[in-house]
Amino acid sequence: MKNLEILFEAFLWRSRLVVLFAVVASLLTGFGIFFVTTVDVWYMLMHVGEYASPALDAAQRAHLRSEFLTHVVESVDGYLLATVMLIFSLGLYELFISKIDAAEGAETSSKVMVIHSLDDLKARLVKVIFMILVVKFFEHAVRMDYTDTLQLLALAGAIALIGLALFLSHAGEGHGKARVPNPGEGH
């Protein structure tokens, strides 16, 4: 009976390797998004010279400028989404397969890539997804035509709410961490 238990537990432990499919798929998806976004940026930059054309009138130039800014924001959005997929794949690997030795010991590596728990992974993903939402909001705000002061007031209110959300998301980072007292403080 003990041998059966040992075999079953070994099978259970090795079953975590199925996560490798998600790691590889997420990594490839991230690479794909990086590639597509980079190609979009390349073509956008190929057409940036059209802005200086003397044949454009003010309305056409304003439209071209708006389109260019929209493409820039979409590019930021694409790179952020690719980053989400990269963080997700590295996090899954570290949580279920093995620690990434190169990330732990490297002085040049970012601590955002070191995942110690499911909560770490979730927190990092939430931050990047929140930034994607902010970029999407900016993208829509750039495209809107503001015809009255009420619309501008709504935009200002939305920006204030985003600022508050950013503040609260950063303020929440301090919870759960032990506070180190100053040497002069009493215990």
Image (cartoon, rainbow, N blue to C red):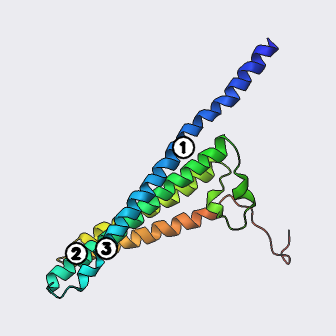
167 and 89: which one is in front? 89
* Dot 3 crowding, Cα within 10 Å, few <14, some 14–19, many 20+: few
The vertical placement of 174 against 24, above or below, is below
* Dot 2 crowding, Cα within 10 Å, few <14, some 14–19, many 20+: few
* Dot 1 crowding, Cα within 10 Å, few <14, some 14–19, many 20+: some
* Residue that lies at the very extreme toward the bottom in this rendered image: 54
Mark 3 vs mark 2: which is more N-terminal? 3
Which residue is under mark 1? 24
The quarter in which the N terminus is drawn is: top right
Residue 173 appears in the figure: yes
Q: Which mark is residue 170?
A: none
12 and 140: which one is in front? 12
Helix, strand or loop at mark 2: helix
Helix, strand or loop at mark 3: helix
Which residue is under mark 2? 150
Which residue is under mark 3? 46
- The image shows residue 163 at horizontal and vertical percentages of 45, 71
- The image shows residue 47 at horizontal and vertical percentages of 28, 74
